[in-house]
Each structure stands twice: as C-alpha cells, then as structure tokens.
Amino acid sequence: MFGNSSKSWKLFSVFGHQIYLSPWFLLLIALFSFSGIEAGGGAQAFGRVLIWAPVLMGGILFHEFGHAFALQGFGYGPSRIELQGFGGVTINLRRQQTPPGKSILISVAGPVASALLAVLSYGILLGLGDALSPASFWGEFLWTMAAVNLFWAIFNMLPINPMDGGHIVLHALRWGLKDARKAVRYSAISSLVFLGLALAAALAMGYAGIALLWLIMLGAMFGMQNWQMYQATK
C-alpha cells in the first residue's frame, strides 16, 4: 500500500516477479504479534505469534500478486513487489501512462485477489468440518486468514489515495475528464473529503484507545499524501 525504506532484501522470484522485504514490514508483523501475546498466555499466545507472520506476509503478497499478474496479463512484463510500511507495493518499470480502463482493472485485481484468498481459506475451513477444530492452530490460522483478507479487500476499496479505491477514482476521473492534472486534483480533494467523513464516523461510533490512535495515524499519513497531490496540481 505505502511506505518507504532505504533498505530492502530480495526474498525470491515467482514467474519473473521479484519479491523484496523492507525492515518496516517486519515492524508491522512484530506489532501484531505483540498484540497476540497481550491477548493470551503460554502456548496460545505463542500460537498467535506464529499465525500473524504468515497471515500478514501471505495475504499482502497474494494481494500484490493480483496487481502484478494483471500487469503481466496486459503485456507489461514482470514487476517488483515490495512488502513495506503498512502493506505492499507493486512496481512495474515498463508501465508508463496506462489507459484508464486498464488502470482500473489493475487496481481492482488486488482486492479481488484478497477476496479470493479469504473465500478459499473459509472454504477449506468449512470443507474440513469436524476434522478441524476452530480452536486448533490450523483452525485459527484459516479463520484469521479469511477474516484478515476480507478486511484487506474491503479496506483497500475505500476511495482514498493511496489505496486501490483511491486509484480507481483517479483513473475514472482520467477517463471522464480527459485531463490527467485535473483528475489528480479532484482525486486528492475527494480523498480528503472521504477521509474526513471516515474519521468523523469513527469518532461518532465511539472508537477509542489503540484503535483510534491507529486511525489518526493512518489518517494523518493519507491526508498528508493527498494534500501534497493537491498542492502539486495548483
């Protein structure tokens, strides 16, 4: 999704797509693992630590593969996928100004991949039925994988840059306005408006503590990026 680091490590390649890992992504895994330790004790807490690393890495990587395979399908070749910050990013050096229609499909491909992984995980859980206890390690793993990826698919479709929903709005504006500069400007404005409404709704719903802190932090990051986009088009 977003994030930057001056250092990253190459992990492996899949169909020419090169996978890199940033230290900031390890921090994200550590934060979720720590929340798992806080939620329980002993073997149960250790199990949650083991669950979060593959859930986050596998889920976000699957999401980015959605974008990468869509790009490859449109003839742009392999991409570089970086697991960084609070998510991941797919970088394709051969892609320049993609037509709006293709750009929308490439943006949608990530959330669709996340939704498919959620359905697959839940389908396996249902298929195994009584053979797999929901309280077991693999039962909790599949349930967490399904829930997290469904959330990730929905969250990324919010019409706020730099998420996929924000990109879809941007490319739809490019399509309708035929003016890339105006499209970026109006996309930034719509993102800021929706971001303000989302934060107001969270406060009205009684969000507090760590959840509110995360929302404020993400809101500040998204808001700053969209304000910079808006300023660049003045």
Image (tube, rainbow, N blue to C red):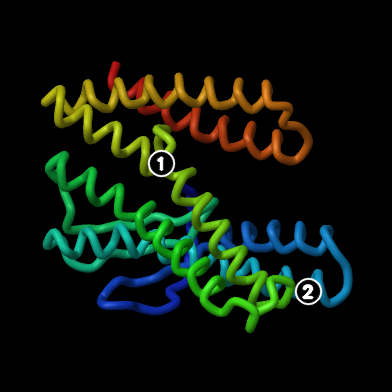
Q: To which residue does mark 2 refer?
A: 46
Q: Locate the C terminus by quadrant.
A: top left
Q: Position of residue 97 (x, y in %)?
A: 15, 43
**Circle 2/circle 1 CB separation < 8 Å:** no
Residue at image x 51%, y 63%? 22
Q: To which residue does mark 1 refer?
A: 157
Where 84 sits versus 210, above or below? below
Asked whether, in this view, residue 101 is left or right of residue 84, the answer is: left
Asked whether, in this view, residue 156 is left or right of residue 35, the answer is: left
Q: Position of residue 40 (x, y in %)?
A: 85, 64
Asked whether, in this view, residue 217 is left or right of residue 85, the answer is: right
Residue at image x 16%, y 47%? 102
Q: How many marks?
A: 2
Residue at image x 44%, y 50%? 153
Residue at disc 2, secondary structure: helix
Amino acid residing under circle 2:
Phe
Asked whether, in this view, residue 92 is left or right of residue 153, the answer is: left
Q: Position of residue 200 (x, y in %)?
A: 61, 20
Residue at disc 1, secondary structure: loop
Residue at image x 26%, y 76%? 16
Q: Position of residue 11 (x, y in %)?
A: 45, 77
Where 96 sits versus 14, above or below? above
